[in-house]
Image (tube, rainbow, N blue to C red):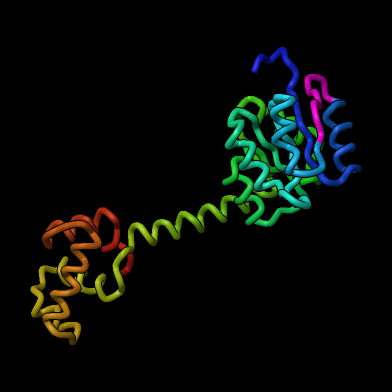
Amino acid sequence: MDSAEPVKVVLVDDHDLIRRGIRVMLESEEGIEIVGEASDGSKVLALVEETFPDVVVMDVVMPGKDGIDTTAEIKDNFPNVGVVVLSGHDEQQFIFDALKAGASGYLLKTADLDDVISTVRAVAKGQAKIDPEVAAKVLTEFQNYQQAELTDQYQPLTPREREILQAMSEGLPNKTIATRLSISERTVTTHVANIYTKLQVNNRVSAIQEAMRRRILDLGI
């Protein structure tokens, strides 16, 4: 976008008074132009197609089509249009859903005027900005997601399989492993085969190397 051109903004909020207040707030800043308003998510796509905004500033909770679905629809059809969610909700699920739908900004309605303006300008330039009050929630949710992904990807073995893998790393044969764990040698053989399958290897050395790469053997086994 040419820096000399104003940032064109569409406002979406089902509360007229709030929408009017946001309009007054943004129009008080030089270089920002409000080109359209909507009180219902179902009307936004046609409005965006008609006005070609740089940024849509949108509430999350609205009757009919909410801000999450509307954001996803905008990004599917107009990927260059930025979306800033301006919401009264700071719950993790709202924040994460909005970001996953394609929003580049998430602000609370308690945000300062300067924060709203700077976020709109940043998103118009293709950048992302999140309210500091909700950033910690996003980080926590991301860390939880990352840890779950790590568990699925790097710890695919059952506790018994990890026990057997540990014994394998000590160079113990199946018969000795069976004695140590008080199970049959056939059961050990079955577990070893499952370990090979899950780690996508075909021998003990490769299994141990892959387990070390995935840090399975470093996780308290």
Boundaries of the magenta span: 29-37
Q: Is residue 22 magenta?
A: no
Q: Quadrant of residue 111?
A: top right
Give the dominant element type of the magenta stretch: helix, strand or loop.
strand
Q: Position of residue 18 (x, y in %)?
A: 87, 43
Image point (69%, 35%), residue name: 45
In this rendering, is residue 23 above or below 186? above
Image point (18%, 56%), residue name: 209
In this rendering, is residue 150 above or below 71? below
Side of 167 where 18 appears, left or right: right
From the viewer's side, name the closer residue of 134 and 61: 61
Badge count = 0
Image point (74%, 43%), residue name: 41
From the viewer's side, name the closer residue of 1 and 160: 1
From the viewer's side, name the closer residue of 11 and 6: 11
Q: Residue at the far right: name it.
A: 17
Q: Residue at the far bottom: name it.
A: 182
Image point (61%, 42%), residue name: 72
Q: Position of residue 1 (x, y in %)?
A: 64, 18
Q: Quadrant of residue 192?
A: bottom left
Q: Residue at the far top: name it.
A: 4
Quadrant the C terminus occupies: bottom left
In this rendering, is residue 73 above or below 25? below
Q: Position of residue 10 (x, y in %)?
A: 76, 31
Side of 111 where 184 appears, left or right: left
Q: Position of residue 201 (x, y in %)?
A: 17, 57
